[in-house]
Image (cartoon, rainbow, N blue to C red):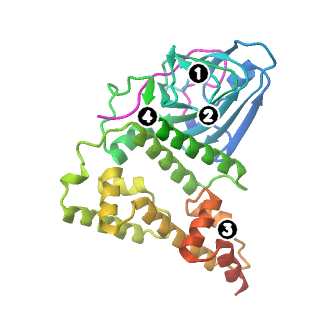
Amino acid sequence: MTIFSNASGLKAAYGPSVSDPIASRCSSGLSVNTRVASDADEQARNLSGWRQTYDQLTPGAFTGSVSELCLEQITVFCETTSHALRQTCEVGSDAYWFGIPLQNNGPGLIDGHLIADDALAVMRGRDEFELMTAGGYRILGVVIEEAELRAHACEVERIDFSDDVLSRQILNVGAPRKASLCDALSVLLLTAQAGPQPLSTAASRNVQSCVLAMLFDLGVSPPTDDLSESRSKSDRYWIVMQARDYILAHRDRPVAVPELCRQFHVSRRTLQYCFEETLGMTPMSYLRAIRLNGARRDLSSAQAMVPRTVQSVAADWGFWHLSQFASDYRKLFGKRPSESLREAVAS
């Protein structure tokens, strides 16, 4: 009836206490922190909040790196290692880890099970696991606080997220969907790393909800207590109108899909179905248009005495990918955001 799988843990000699919540493990705020290592032990210590021991299995000078983005309840990272390793790992007891290997020259094994090209590894804190990786290995990771994962499942996806379901170490998702997830997470890390300033709180929450939605889309069956098809057309229309009124009543700040789901007690899939049927667009597209209009108003009302930048306005409205924001803005309004700001300051 539901999602991913489970298992993760260890008692190794390195890393901070695994009982700390994700927010306290990460010292980099809402920007990407990259750490480089010249030996396996140093690499093992570089991942925030983990206890792990790395044993190098092939000869030569080791190099490795970890690029880590810390959000409020989620950490996204990319780890690269130059040599074959045996890793004993444990993530925090309050969290789940999703490991997504990128295209590699050799296989990765979790507790002896192959992580195939169409699969992810999923592990729960408190559970020790062994990870065997080939030389030149790259893996994306998402660590999510268990409370946030369960709250999202209940309040946004509206699915059963019982421990009975969280029992697999390998989640087969299909190669195309895995590739799509890898691309999205890689773009997120690269964009946050290249950004001129850390993500704003609004942008961080927007990213976090997108990451959760991507993960749930990989392995969840349709909700059984909130099927869109079971609602009448008038009910679906009412949901959209209520959501629209709520969005417009709060148009001075960015509203996200999870907020609508919680407000109107519908699943994300139901909300999407209702919006597509009634307005011919997804709720995310509708919300993006409202947020773009909010950004345009802020840019157009800027004054020379109160300096604003395109980046700061975009961040205030939850946009974290600046080039995508500029492209969407120009598509909707026929001009660049920088033009709107320049015209406002000159007037």
Q: Nearer the viewer, residue 191 or 177?
A: 177
Quadrant in the picture for the C terminus: bottom right
Disc 1 crowd rating (10 Å Cα; few below 14, some 14-19, many 20+) is some
Majority secondary structure in the magenta region: loop
Q: Which residue is mark 1?
A: 107
Return the disc, 3 or 4, that comes first in the chain's sequence: 4
Image quarter of residue 26: top right
Q: Are marks 4 and 1 in contact (CB under 8 Å)?
A: no
> Residue flagged by tag 3: what amino acid is it?
Val
Q: What's the CA distance linking mark 2 and mark 1?
A: 29 Å
Return the disc, 4 or 1, that comes first in the chain's sequence: 1
Magenta segment: 1-21
Residue 230 as seen in the image, left or right of residue 315: left
Q: Residue at x 56, y 46 (%)?
A: 184
Residue 276 as seen in the image, left or right of residue 318: left
Q: Which residue is mark 2?
A: 25
Answer whether residue 214 is visible to the viewer in this image: yes
> Residue flagged by tag 1: what amino acid is it?
Pro
Q: What's the CA distance linking mark 4 and mark 1?
A: 17 Å
Disc 1 element: loop
Q: Are marks 2 and 4 in contact (CB under 8 Å)?
A: no
Return the disc, 2 or 3, that comes first in the chain's sequence: 2
Disc 3 element: helix
Return the disc, 2 or 1, that comes first in the chain's sequence: 2
The circle drawn on residue 310 is 3
Q: Nearer the viewer, mark 2 or mark 4?
A: 4
The image shows residue 331 at horizontal and vertical percentages of: 56, 71
The image shows residue 189 at horizontal and vertical percentages of: 64, 45
